[in-house]
Amino acid sequence: MHREVGAYDAKTHLPQLLREVGHGDRITITVRGKPVADLVPTQQTVGRAGDSVRAMQQFDLVKGVDPEAVADWIQEGRR
């Protein structure tokens, strides 16, 4: 995902923006509507995410589980 953020908002919300960039997002910082800087993930961050995706793709599919049980698991994980 790519989005633009004003300099004041970037300063105010820097920790949140860094978390987003750590998840692969790209953020352009603007001053008076003009782009002046980009926050982008480092190569190390991108590599780890790609490794994680490849590892998850190797998981065996879960078979024979009731859909209601899966819904319960999802709800439990959101607490």
Image (cartoon, rainbow, N blue to C red):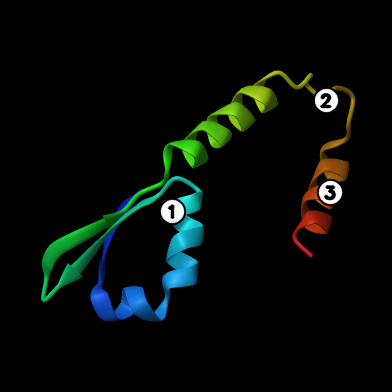
Q: Secondary structure at mark 2?
A: loop
Q: Secondary structure at mark 1?
A: helix
Residue at 55% in and 36% down: 49
Name the spot of residue 40 as percent of width and height, x first: 35, 49
Quarter holding residue 68: top right
Q: How far across and down, in percent of the image, does residue 73 sit?
A: 84, 48
Q: Amino acid at mark 2?
A: Val
Residue 63: mark: none
Please identify the quadrant where the C terminus is shown.
Answer: bottom right
Spatial CA span between label 1 and label 3: 28 Å
Query: Residue 21, which numbered label?
Result: 1
Q: Name which quarter of the figure residue 32 lies in.
A: bottom left
Distance from the alpha carbon under mark 1 to that under mark 2: 32 Å
Q: Is residue 44 left or right of residue 11?
A: right
Instruction: Name the element at disc 3.
Output: helix
User: Which of the two discs, 1 and 3, sits closer to the camera?
Assistant: 1
* Dot 1 and dot 3 residues touching (CB under 8 Å): no
Left or right, 24 with respect to 36, comes to: right
Name which residue type carries label 3: Trp
- Disc 3 and disc 2 in contact, CB within 8 angstroms: no
Q: Which residue is mark 3?
A: 73
Nearer the camera: disc 1 or disc 2: 1
* Label 2 sits on residue: 62
Q: Earlier in the sequence, mark 1 or mark 3?
A: 1
